[in-house]
Image (cartoon, rainbow, N blue to C red):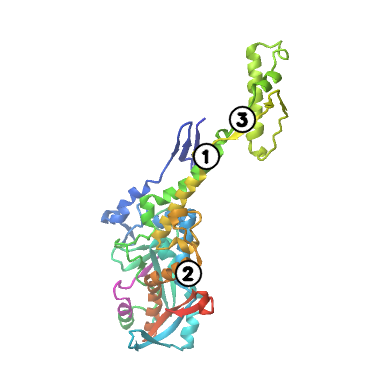
């Protein structure tokens, strides 16, 4: 019997037939060429300004958020990158010079207002939300919030990237909370955006010309995944494994296994029923009043009841008793045999494929699978990694590779501090690193 699996909208996802399992795949990425090329005819207008849609339906981040949320290893990998970037907080310092070994010389910047600001609620919100959007969507949109006089920045807010679109000239940021359901209306908010290459200089010019008074907020140039060449909306690092199909593999393996386990019960066991048992149970003397056809139907009904009794879900792990006696040759007379069949669609094979997909997704995020102990499930594919040394080194490498994103997130905050008069300030991250036992302690704090 053919069984068709559908999603909530009754779109076919998989079909299980007698000889094949057919699954659907997502081909919408090929329809996103329009969004990738960002052609002029794709732009939309809001109150006299042209804006660039994000994706073929102007809802790329909405669909991507749903996708990331459905892929466990991708969701966890992005969360891991965010956590390693954030570290254990930040400290303000002043760069004094470089020593004879070419190492930077720092001094603590002991301004209590700055220290309190870097430990404030708004700073942590900006940091975590900017990192989240940067790794999940490839873009983050910080906004500088001013006092009424326009001469001081009081905080940096990161607007949820799902609600943001950039103008064609990159001089305005459109914020609207419901792009998922259509074009923006009068509830949308337009924020002027600073020059992409020289935001601090642009800020100082706006201040000197009085353009910041009463504005309330100015958008910092969007933070983006530097490796993407898109002019407006950068693609996240994980987009490569989506296009190559590894995310589809990750999603299909559990569906395939679930389908196999649900529909292959009849292929799992072979029950050998001796003729002597059948001859005794359905003897011609006992069923003398029946025709051979009626006797056959009785036999088929008994077999169906037996299969239902042994194979149904509610009878899992149920005992099965069949008495017998030895014949003259010492063999079991009427003895039943229940043999497990060799299932060619083994779980081990599919789990190895799943681990390969996991590793490919983590590689796309520049995460060594060893940091999650990915050794035992993957066997030789994962290199049997996951020892303490592997995890420690993978974690340190992650912090090193995160330098670019860390600086991007701090750029609007450092711009804010310098605009507010803290001329030579720099911000560095605290990192709690794992160490080996021969150092006498298990962790060590570093400033980077």
SS for callout 3: strand
- Comparing 218 with 289, the one in front is 289
Q: Which residue is mark 1?
A: 260
**Which residue is the extreme one toward the front?**
329
Seen at 46% across and 62% down, the residue is 370
Q: Which residue is mark 3?
A: 271
Taking the magenta stretch, the answer to whether it contains residue 196 is: yes
Q: Position of residue 277 (x, y in %)?
A: 68, 22
- Comparing 40 with 272, the one in front is 272
Mark 3 or mark 1: name the one nearer the start of the chain: 1
* CA gap, disc 2 and disc 1: 39 Å
Q: Position of residue 24 (x, y in %)?
A: 42, 41
- 58 lies above or below 195: above
- 322 lies above or below 182: above
Mark 2 or mark 1: name the one nearer the start of the chain: 1
- 440 lies above or below 37: below
* CA gap, disc 3 and disc 1: 20 Å
10 Å neighbourhood of mark 2: few (<14), some, or many (≥20)?
some
10 Å neighbourhood of mark 1: few (<14), some, or many (≥20)?
some
SS for callout 2: helix
Identify the magenta region.
187-203
Q: From the viewer's perspective, is the residue at label 3 or at label 1 nearer?
A: 3
């Amino acid at each position: 019997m053919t069984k068709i699996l559908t999603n909530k909208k009754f779109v076919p996802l998989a079909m299980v037939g007698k000889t094949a399992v057919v699954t659907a795949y997502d081909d919408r990425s090929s329809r996103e060429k329009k969004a990738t090329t960002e052609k002029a005819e794709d732009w939309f207008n809001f109150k006299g300004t042209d804006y660039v849609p994000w994706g073929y339906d102007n809802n790329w981040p909405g669909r991507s958020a749903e996708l990331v949320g459905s892929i466990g290893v991708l969701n966890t990998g992005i969360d891991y990158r965010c956590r390693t970037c954030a570290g254990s907080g930040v400290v303000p310092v002043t760069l004094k010079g470089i020593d004879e070994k070419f190492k930077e010389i720092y001094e603590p910047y002991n301004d209590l207002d700055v220290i309190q600001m870097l430990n404030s609620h708004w700073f942590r919100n900006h940091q975590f939300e900017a990192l989240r959007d940067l790794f999940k969507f490839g873009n983050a949109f910080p906004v500088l919030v001013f006092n009424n006089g326009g001469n001081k920045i009081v905080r940096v807010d990161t607007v949820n990237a799902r609600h943001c679109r950039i103008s064609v000239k990159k001089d305005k940021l459109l914020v609207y909370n419901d792009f998922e359901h259509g074009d923006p209306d009068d509830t949308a908010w337009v924020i002027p955006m600073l020059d992409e290459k020289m935001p601090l200089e642009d800020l100082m010019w706006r201040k000197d010309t009085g353009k910041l008074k009463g504005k309330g907020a100015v958008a910092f140039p969007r933070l983006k995944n530097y490796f993407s060449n898109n002019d407006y909306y950068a693609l996240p690092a994980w987009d490569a494994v989506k296009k190559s199909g590894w995310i589809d593999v990750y999603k299909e393996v559990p569906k395939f296994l679930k389908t196999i386990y649900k529909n292959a019960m009849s292929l799992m066991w072979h029950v050998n029923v001796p003729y002597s048992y059948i001859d005794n149970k359905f003897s011609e003397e006992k069923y003398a009043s029946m025709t051979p056809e009626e006797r056959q139907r009785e036999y088929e009904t008994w077999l169906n009841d037996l299969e239902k009794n042994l194979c149904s879900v509610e009878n899992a792990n149920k005992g099965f008793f069949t008495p017998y006696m030895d014949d003259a040759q010492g063999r079991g007379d009427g003895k039943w045999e229940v043999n497990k069949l060799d299932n060619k669609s083994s779980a081990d094979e599919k789990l190895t494929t799943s681990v390969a997909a996991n590793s490919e997704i983590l590689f796309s995020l520049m995460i060594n699978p060893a940091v999650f102990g990915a050794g035992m499930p993957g066997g030789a594919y994962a290199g049997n990694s996951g020892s303490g040394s592997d995890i420690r080194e993978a974690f340190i490498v992650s912090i090193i590779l995160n330098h670019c994103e860390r600086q991007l997130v701090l750029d609007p905050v450092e711009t804010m501090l310098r605009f507010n008069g803290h001329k030579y300030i720099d911000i560095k991250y605290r990192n709690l690193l794992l160490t080996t036992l021969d150092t006498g302690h298990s962790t060590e704090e570093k400033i980077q």
